[in-house]
Image: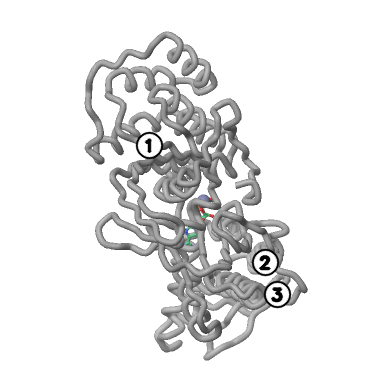
């Protein structure tokens, strides 16, 4: 089955073409074409994602990205293909709220042959509603023009299923030998959830954050440390430097950088180490809370007034340590209470090197027989390949959505995936 997939839930516009084969027990995917444009540089000046700007950029980028994915897949044949009046009108109505997109769409669609694609997969939530709508309306317009069915994909399902793939060489991925029940730890900019999958594609949320998502906490701490958006990877880099430094002798470092002791900290091997809280670590449930941790960083910084580069690094490490402790503990409890055989970690924060390392170590040492699935780094952030993978599972079940009822929902939960 050949699938065209579209992702526009946040600040990445992405279009992919995948060939999928097999079934739930064993599926293989070949990436035929993949085009992605990140809006990070545009949003950086706002210090975060600005929904109206994201919407405008998606509308501008979708047609060029589709053309580039088709070209890469060698599925683009130029020829005059005028639409009939009925289809033209339906498409014009579908795209009327996406300024600029309709003109580019008509110019493109009437100049290429319909490619041999069996299904379209599009993210229909959760995410930023105005951004999601652009992708959904674009998918609808393509569906009308080419008469191809659309599968709506839950963004979180995309993160979960894409974390199960193993790379099978150049541009080929496989999902196989996955034992259920599966526990998924979703860590992204908008979500922190523990999700149980007892049967394929059926999800039960068993834990979640009560306030900030992990990625959000990373981004906010980054802002406090004057790091550019998106801050998660920057905090990770600082923390890694502190870890590298602590494996060197303290005498090698500039000790004049250590300010007099104020606020929560302790001395270790002659170095000052910050101590941050682990909110809800011992609570009787599988929920998380990261807002107190973020505030603790804020207070510490306020109290000090000024921090050196070395202190910033140690603070980033203390933050990462606290996040890791909480995620590990709650995940371990969930693995035990559910008897899960597979742990899947998905979402943008799963790119974090330290978290990857501690999870690999902890599963190997403490959870005998549990298989850990973490996506390769190129699949951790938002992309259309993950939407194509989940779309394949949906399409294989004939799970298509009639265009009249296909809608974007910024708060869509996995239970309605
Ligand atoms: O899944 P994603 O790309 O978008 C959402 O669905 O939210 O996740 C984005 C989040 C951002 O908060 C970003 O700062 C965080 O993932 N992130 C990281 C790292 N790379 C991305 N956080 C910590 N360490 C990283 N290396
Ligand atoms: Zn995401």
Image x and y of residue 324, in percent:
57, 73
**Other residues around mark 1 within 10 Å, as few (<14) / some (14–19) / many (≥20):** some
**Other residues around mark 3 within 10 Å, as few (<14) / some (14–19) / many (≥20):** some
Mark 1: secondary structure:
loop
The answer to whether residue 45 is visible is no
**Other residues around mark 2 within 10 Å, as few (<14) / some (14–19) / many (≥20):** some
Q: Which mark is residue 293?
A: 2
Vertical side of 341 occupied by 409: above or below: above
- Return the residue found at the far bottom: 269
Vertical side of 324 occupied by 11: above or below: above
> Which residue occupies the foreground of this view, 17 or 10?
17
**Which tag is nearer the camera, tag 2 or tag 1?**
1
Scheme by which the image is coloured: one colour
> Which residue occupies the foreground of this view, 400 or 54?
400
| Residue 33 falls in image quadrant | top left
Q: Label 3 belongs to which residue?
A: 281
Query: In the image, is 250 to the left or to the right of 79?
Result: right
Indicate which disc, 1 or 3, sits on the residue closer to the N terminus: 1
The residue at 38%/22% (across/down) is: 105
Q: Label 1 belongs to which residue?
A: 118
Query: In the image, is 397 to the left or to the right of 4?
Result: right
Report the Cα–Cα distance between label 2 and label 1: 47 Å
Indicate which disc, 2 or 3, sits on the residue closer to the N terminus: 3
Mark 3: secondary structure:
loop
Vertical side of 252 occupied by 144: above or below: above
Image x and y of residue 143, in percent:
44, 27
**Which tag is nearer the camera, tag 2 or tag 3?**
3
Report the Cα–Cα distance between label 1 and label 3: 47 Å
The residue at 36%/60% (across/down) is: 174
């Amino acid at each position: 089955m050949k699938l065209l997939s579209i992702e526009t839930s946040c600040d990445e516009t992405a279009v992919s073409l995948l060939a999928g084969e097999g079934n739930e027990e064993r599926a293989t995917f070949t990436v035929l074409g993949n085009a992605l444009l990140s809006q990070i540089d545009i949003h950086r000046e706002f210090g975060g994602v600005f929904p109206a700007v994201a919407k405008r950029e998606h509308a501008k980028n979708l047609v060029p990205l589709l053309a580039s994915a088709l070209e890469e897949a060698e599925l683009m044949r130029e020829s005059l293909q005028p639409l009939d009046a009925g289809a033209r009108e339906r498409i014009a109505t579908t795209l009327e709220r996406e300024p600029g997109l309709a003109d580019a769409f008509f110019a493109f669609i009437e100049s290429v042959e319909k490619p041999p694609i069996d299904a379209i997969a599009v993210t229909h939530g959760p995410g930023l509603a105005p951004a999601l709508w652009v992708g959904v309306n674009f998918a609808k317009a393509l569906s009308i023009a080419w008469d191809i069915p659309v599968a709506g994909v839950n963004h979180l399902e995309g993160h979960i299923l894409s974390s199960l793939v193993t790379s099978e060489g150049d541009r080929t991925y496989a999902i196989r030998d996955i034992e259920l029940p599966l526990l998924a730890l979703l860590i992204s900019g908008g979500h922190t959830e523990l999700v149980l999958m007892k049967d394929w594609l059926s999800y039960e949320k068993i834990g979640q954050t009560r306030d900030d998502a992990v990625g959000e906490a990373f981004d906010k701490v980054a802002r406090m440390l004057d790091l550019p958006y998106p801050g998660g990877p920057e905090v990770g880099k600082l923390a890694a430097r502190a870890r590298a430094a602590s494996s060197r002798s303290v005498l090698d470092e500039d000790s004049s950088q250590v300010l007099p002791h104020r606020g929560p900290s302790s001395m270790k091997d002659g170095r000052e180490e910050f101590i941050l809280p682990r909110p809800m670590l011992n609570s009787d449930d599988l929920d998380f809370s990261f807002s107190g941790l973020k505030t603790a960083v804020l207070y510490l910084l306020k109290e000090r007034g000024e921090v050196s580069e070395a202190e910033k690094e140690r603070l980033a490490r203390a933050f990462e340590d606290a996040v890791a402790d909480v995620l590990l503990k709650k995940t371990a409890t969930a693995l035990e209470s559910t008897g899960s055989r597979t742990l899947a970690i998905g979402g943008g924060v799963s790119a974090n090197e330290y978290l990857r390392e501690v999870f690999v170590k902890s599963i190997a040492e403490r959870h005998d027989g549990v298989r850990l699935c973490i996506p390769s780094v190129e699949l951790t952030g938002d992309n259309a390949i993950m939407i194509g993978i989940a779309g394949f599972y949906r399409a294989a079940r004939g799970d298509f959505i009639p265009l009249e009822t296909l809608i974007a929902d910024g708060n869509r939960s996995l239970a309605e995936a």
